[in-house]
Amino acid sequence: MITNALLEYQRTLEIKPSYTKAINEIGWIYYNKGDIETAIKQWKKTLKINTRDRDAVLNLAKVYNDQAWNALTSGRKQEAINFWQRVFKINPGNKASNYYLKKYGS
């Protein structure tokens, strides 16, 4: 089923390469398969097409917040701060990144 969805999104992009909804959904397919880096590349691709695409911004913020939290709980505070700074850069209103940057220093 996932393979079929991926194929359909890829077909969609053959017709309209700038269709960001398909690019974002491909990102989620990779994310759910555990391929976080490829998912991030998809969402960044969306932002190259539309710098204000809400879905891509929220998707990246979620992934970077998750990575920050994982880094923090593994004792890698500076790495966590770096991820929260990425969140802040793409989504300055993100409450989690703002809170943790204030708490742990930016």
Image (cartoon, rainbow, N blue to C red):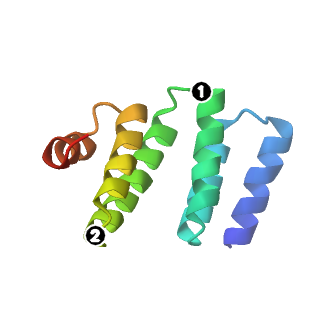
* Quadrant the N terminus occupies: bottom right
Horizontally, is 100 left or right of 36 in the view? Answer: left
- Residue placed at 40% from the left, 46% from the top? 61
Q: Position of residue 98 (x, y in %)?
A: 22, 39
Q: Earlier in the sequence, mark 1 or mark 2?
A: 1
Q: Residue furthest right?
A: 14
Q: Position of residue 66 (x, y in %)?
A: 36, 60
- Camera-side residue of 65 and 82: 82
Judge whether residue 29 can be spotted in this image: no
Q: Would you name the residue on which mark 2 appears?
A: 75
Q: Position of residue 82 (x, y in %)?
A: 38, 48
Q: Position of residue 7 (x, y in %)?
A: 79, 60
Q: Would you name the residue on which mark 1 appears?
A: 50
The type of residue carrying mark 1 is Asn
Image-quadrant location for residue 105: top left
Instruction: For marks 1 and 2, give the CA distance.
Output: 35 Å
